[in-house]
Image (cartoon, rainbow, N blue to C red):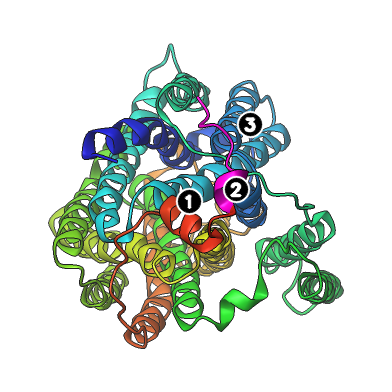
Amino acid sequence: MSNRQILQAMSGLMAGMFVAILAGTVVANALPTIIADLGASQSSYTWVVTSELLAMTATVPLWGKLSDLFDKKLLLQLSLGMFVAGSLLAGFSNGVELLIFSRVVQGIGAGGLTALAQVVMAAIIPPRRLGKYAGIFGAVFAVGTVAGPLVGGVLVDTSWLGWRWCFFIGVPFALLAIVLLQRTLRLPVIRREARIDFLGAFLIVAGVCALLIWVTLAGNEFDWASWQTAALTGTGVLLLAAAVFVEARTAEPVIPLHIFRNRTVTLTTVASLLVGVAMFGGTVFLSQYFQVSLGKSPTVAGLMSLPMILGLLVSSTVAGQVISRTGVWKRYLVAGASIMTVGLGLLSTIDADTSFALLSLYMAVLGIGVGMLMQNLVLAAQNDVPASELGAATSVLSFFRSMGGTIGTSVLGAILAGRVATEMTKGMEAAGIPASPGTSGDGESSVPDMSTLPEPVRAVVEHAYGVATADLFLVATPCALLALITVVFLKEKPLRTTSGIERLAEESGPAADTDKAAVGG
């Protein structure tokens, strides 16, 4: 395919990915307002983020396996349709329970987009050329991440629109993506007679959900050492053990266990998990820090994240172009992991008095590291697996990265709530202020509405959230360091010069020609 044909085929993919990113980022600056408007708690704040991540994480392997068996374009359009349904439900939510359910529906759709977009790219673009297109996707990621919080902040600050439009705004983009995919994406469909491993899929989803619900609720709804912990962890481990048993014996497993014999896949999977914990877990609470600790409006909070996103945009694009030109990729993974570790370490020094200039520098460093590392982990894995397993390998990396993000968000959310409670209690006692409802900082108290607090209490709350947010980055830093150690052990292999479709035809042999269906339109 020529560059023009590839870009045309990618137009729908990029619109779809933009929608998925927008779903996660547009609510970032709106969440404090949404939670306050619905009268919900700090744990609900975490759940609104976690529920989408959890649903996306749990369903990514199934979407990836389906892509190895069925029409990838149709699956992409189905996932976009689920996203539209979830967005409409979220926009019309009148309580936090319905909002969380709608985020689950959005998450299932986003899981399809996350897995399938990269699978389709690998199918039509050779690894040697994939770097620069991955850089374009990095740019879309950056634009969506910038536009999301900014648009969300503007919508919240505009009285005649409000936070509900944070969900409605993604619907036209999703519909546009469905149309573009229908018009521009042409993929040969190879008919494979295979049964979907529904039992394995159920066991994986149920096991992962049990463990993720545990890390979300533990330390908040119940103690870490409690019967609820024993029940959820025991159930999760048993279900996943049963999943391994089933996956090892079925002809078409959702996650083929033998791919972990591949050193590149195993190491990139571990690194993706750690990147998820470090990046998502650390940055998801930045918007809350900007608004609560620094006292900024949602719109300003959106603008304050620009340095991190610009760093990601530049490094992702430049590294992708250089990798495509030279065919050398490992040094950029090592450099990216090193810079990400430094960035998280710097952010662990912030407090309520940190200047915006320093914050900008620290966030830019983090963005540069993430941009060099995240997308190129997928490239390394896709380059080193058979074409028939591109979907499974890609979805495994997305699965573990999302799982890392969910675990990081949940655990660090619990740490944030606990540290806020401690710091606010100390601050109130030191100032001689009696604790009042909504300012105790525990998991069940409301996120404080800063505009209604008296000045002495406001100062205590600002300090508490500043200290607690710095702690999150301190906890995330060792995870980034472990990711660096992991990528150092990757073995660099030359990037292939044939696309996934071409490789699949080669692997299938002459018999594959008789099995190919007509090119879909």
Left/right placement of residue 241 relative to residue 477 reads right
Measured Cα–Cα span from mark 1 to mark 3: 19 Å
At which x and y percent is residue 81? 60, 27
**Amino acid type shown at disc 2:** Ser
**Amino acid type shown at disc 1:** Val
Q: Nearer the viewer, mark 1 or mark 3?
A: 1
Asked if one can make out residue 437 in the rendered structure from this viewpoint, the answer is no
- Residue range in magenta is 512-521
Which residue is under mark 2?
67
* Residue situated in front as seen by the camera: 322 or 496: 496
Disc sitting over residue 82 in the figure? 3
Q: Which residue shows up at 42% across the image and 73% down it?
A: 476
* Residue situated in front as seen by the camera: 194 or 29: 194
At which x and y percent is residue 115? 53, 50
* Residue situated in front as seen by the camera: 513 or 222: 513
Asked if one can make out residue 5 in the rendered structure from this viewpoint, the answer is yes
Name the dominant secondary structure of the magenta segment: loop
Which residue is under mark 1?
119
